[in-house]
C-alpha cells in the first residue's frame, strides 16, 4: 500500500468516527478492520441517537463503513499485527503482508493492543486473573483523556475503559481523539495557539452577513485569537477554509436530498414498499 497520513486500527464506532474526521480534514486515511468487534455482540442497539426505534447492528455497521468511504478514507479488511516507530512516523505491518508507512497511528480496536508493545513496552500492559488463568491486556487507562501516550504521532482511542462501553460514547471518543490529532497536525503546519482546533461543520449563508461577509472582519477576529507574530499566510488560509464551508439554501437542499437517498440504500426495499403501501392506505 502507498504511504498514508493516518492509519486507524479498528473499524467499529471508535475507528470509523476517527477515520471520518481525519479523512474529511484531508489527511490520507486508511482504516483496518478485522478481528473481534464489540458492536457485533449486541443483539440490537436502542440507545444510538438518531434512530428512534433503534437500529440493528448489521445496518449500523454498514452505515459506519459507508460513511468512512464517503469521507474519502480506505476501509481495508485486514488485521494490524505490528507498529514500529521510524524517524518520520511509523511502519505498520498487517496479517496479510501489507506494509504501510504513516505519519500518524490511531489505535481504535478494543480487542487487542499487542501490536503496540514494540513501541510502548510492557508498562502499557496489565495482567489480571480470569477463570484461574492469567491474561495480559493493554491498559485501558494508559492513554490520557485526549488519546496521547507520549509518543509523537501515536494516539489511543480504544481500548479506553468506560469510554468504549457504549457505541455512541465510543464514536464520540474516536471523534475527540481525531480532533486532537488534527490540532497537533495543524500546529506542525504553523497554525498558532487559538486556531488549532478544527471545527468540521458547514455554515449557512446567514453566517456570512454584515461585517462577517468581509474578509477584513475575519482577519480582525483571527488576530484577536492569535499571538502578534502569527504567520499572515496561515491567517489567509484559515479564512479561505472558513469561506469554503459556506453553503447556499439551494446547496443545502441538494445535500439533504442526497443524504436521504444514501440512507435509503441501507433500508430493505420490502420495508420501503410496505411503508409506501401504508401511506397510500
Image (cartoon, rainbow, N blue to C red):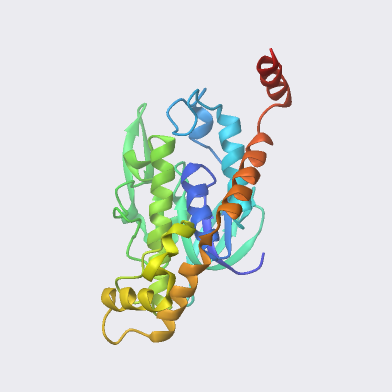
**Vertical order, 269 against 229 (above or below):** above
The answer to which image quadrant residue 238 occupies is bottom left
Q: Position of residue 194 (x, y in %)?
A: 30, 71
Q: Is residue 249 visible?
A: yes
The residue lying at 66 percent from left, 30 percent from top is 267
Q: Is residue 70 above or below residue 163?
A: below
- Image location of residue 10, percent across then percent down: 52, 48
Q: Is residue 93 above or below residue 46?
A: below
Q: Residue furthest front?
A: 210
Residue nearest the observer in this picture, 180 or 122: 180
Could you tell me which quadrant the C terminus lies in?
top right
Q: Is 164 rendered above or below residue 152?
A: above
Image spot of residue 102 (x, y percent): 54, 68
Q: Is residue 34 visible?
A: no
Location of the N terminus (image quadrant): bottom right
Residue in the picture at 71% in, 16% down: 277
Amino acid at each position: 500500500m502507498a504511504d498514508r497520513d493516518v492509519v486507524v486500527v479498528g473499524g467499529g464506532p471508535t475507528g470509523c468516527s476517527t477515520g471520518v474526521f481525519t479523512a474529511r480534514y484531508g489527511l490520507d486515511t486508511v482504516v483496518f478492520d478485522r478481528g473481534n468487534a464489540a458492536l457485533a455482540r449486541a443483539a440490537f442497539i436502542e440507545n444510538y441517537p438518531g434512530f428512534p426505534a433503534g437500529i440493528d447492528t448489521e445496518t449500523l455497521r454498514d452505515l459506519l463503513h459507508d460513511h468512512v468511504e464517503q469521507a474519502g478514507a480506505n476501509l481495508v479488511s485486514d488485521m494490524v499485527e505490528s507498529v514500529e516507530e521510524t524517524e518520520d512516523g511509523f511502519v505498520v505491518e498487517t496479517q496479510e503482508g501489507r506494509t504501510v508507512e504513516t505519519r500518524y497511528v490511531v489505535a481504535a480496536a478494543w480487542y487487542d493492543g499487542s501490536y503496540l508493545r514494540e513501541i510502548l513496552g510492557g508498562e502499557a500492559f496489565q495482567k489480571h486473573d480470569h477463570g484461574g488463568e492469567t491474561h495480559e491486556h493493554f491498559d485501558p487507562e494508559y492513554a490520557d483523556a485526549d488519546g496521547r501516550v507520549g509518543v509523537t504521532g501515536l494516539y489511543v482511542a480504544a481500548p479506553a475503559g468506560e469510554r468504549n462501553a457504549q457505541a455512541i460514547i465510543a464514536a464520540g471518543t474516536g471523534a475527540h481523539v481525531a480532533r486532537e490529532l488534527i490540532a497537533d497536525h495543524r500546529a506542525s503546519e504553523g497554525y498558532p495557539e487559538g486556531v488549532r482546533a478544527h471545527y468540521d461543520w458547514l455554515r449557512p449563508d446567514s453566517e456570512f452577513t454584515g461585517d462577517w461577509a468581509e474578509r477584513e472582519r475575519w482577519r480582525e477576529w483571527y488576530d484577536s485569537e492569535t499571538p502578534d507574530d502569527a504567520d499572515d499566510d496561515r491567517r489567509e488560509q484559515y479564512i479561505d477554509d472558513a469561506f469554503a464551508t459556506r453553503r447556499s439554501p439551494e446547496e443545502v437542499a441538494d445535500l439533504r436530498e442526497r443524504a436521504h437517498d444514501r440512507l435509503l440504500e441501507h433500508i430493505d426495499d420490502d420495508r420501503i414498499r410496505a411503508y409506501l403501501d401504508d401511506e397510500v392506505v
